[in-house]
Structure formats: structure tokens, C-alpha cells
Amino acid sequence: MKKNLLVINGSARSSRSLSKMLSQRFLETWRSTELYGEIQQRDVGTNPPPFVSEAWIAAAFTPEAERSEQDRQILECSDQAISELSNADVIVIATPMYNYGLPAAVKAW
């Protein structure tokens, strides 16, 4: 049975990132298995999602039928992330620890 994989990379480093190296090694192994289905990758370390704002909260609590084009644009990134998460059978979060915590970009995701 094919499984859809979602890989979230949280390191701000574009090179020399141990967590990105580990996720790439995982991907190489994953591709060699019979489970290999759709693979979605998101690098939130180098391309972080926007943080929740007052405008995002207002748009999220507006009924979908009543949302303006601006509301839809504000929610576009989070809607895409929710879709990717919903479609995934397996999720890999490859992230460093900064000062004993997750990077802000991973928390925002």
C-alpha cells in the first residue's frame, strides 16, 4: 500500500544542517521501499510561514462563504499547510533545537 509522506525541515541553515541531512537520508531510504507514494516537502527554516496575526484570526473566524479575497489570501498559506497535513500518511519533522526549544518557524507551521 502506497503512503503519502510529508517532510518538514525546520533548520534555518541552507547547508551544514544535520537535521536536513538526516531527512534526506530518510527520503533516500523511503524512495527505495514499496511504501513510496506522494512526497511533499516544506522547508519552514528557510521559507517560514507567516505568524498568526489579528487579520489571520479575523479571517479564520469569518464563515467561508463570507470571506473577502483579502481573507482568502491571508489564509492561503495555512490552508495549504492543513491540506498537506491532511493528505499525509507519514510525517517527518526534521528540526534542530535552538536553546532547548523548537525554531519559531516550526512553531508557526
Image (spheres, grey):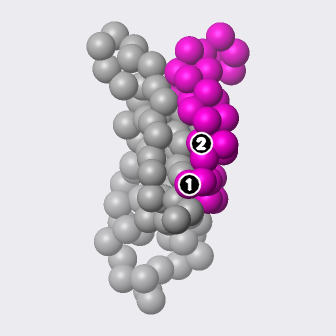
Could you tell me the amino acid type at mark 2? Answer: Trp
Task: Give residue 30's mark.
Answer: 2
Whether residue 97 is visible to the viewer of this picture, yes or no, is: yes
Q: Position of residue 109 (x, y in %)?
A: 44, 44
The residue that appears at 63% across and 59% down in the rendered structure is 38
Return the residue nearer the eye: 70 or 1: 1
Badge 2 marks a residue whose secondary structure is helix
Point out the stretch of residues depicted in magenta.
Answer: 10-39
Give the vertical position of 62 relative to 25 (above or below).
Answer: below
Most distant residue in the right direction: 15
- Asked whether, in this view, residue 11 is left or right of residue 14, the answer is left
The residue that appears at 66% across and 43% down in the rendered structure is 32
Q: Earlier in the sequence, mark 2 or mark 1?
A: 2
Badge 1 marks a residue whose secondary structure is loop
Q: Position of residue 22 (x, y in %)?
A: 56, 23
Give the vertical position of 4 relative to 103 (above or below).
Answer: below
How crowded is the residue under tag 1: few (<14 C-alpha within 10 Å), some, or many (20+)? Answer: few
Query: Is residue 32 found inside the magenta-colored segment of the image?
Result: yes
Return the residue nearer the eye: 23 or 51: 23
Find out whether the residues at labels 2 and 1 contact each other: C-beta distance under 8 Å. Answer: yes
For label 1, the residue is 35
The residue that appears at 56% across and 54% down in the rendered structure is 35
How crowded is the residue under tag 2: few (<14 C-alpha within 10 Å), some, or many (20+)? Answer: some
Give the vertical position of 108 relative to 24 (above or below).
Answer: below
The residue that appears at 45% across and 36% down in the rendered structure is 93
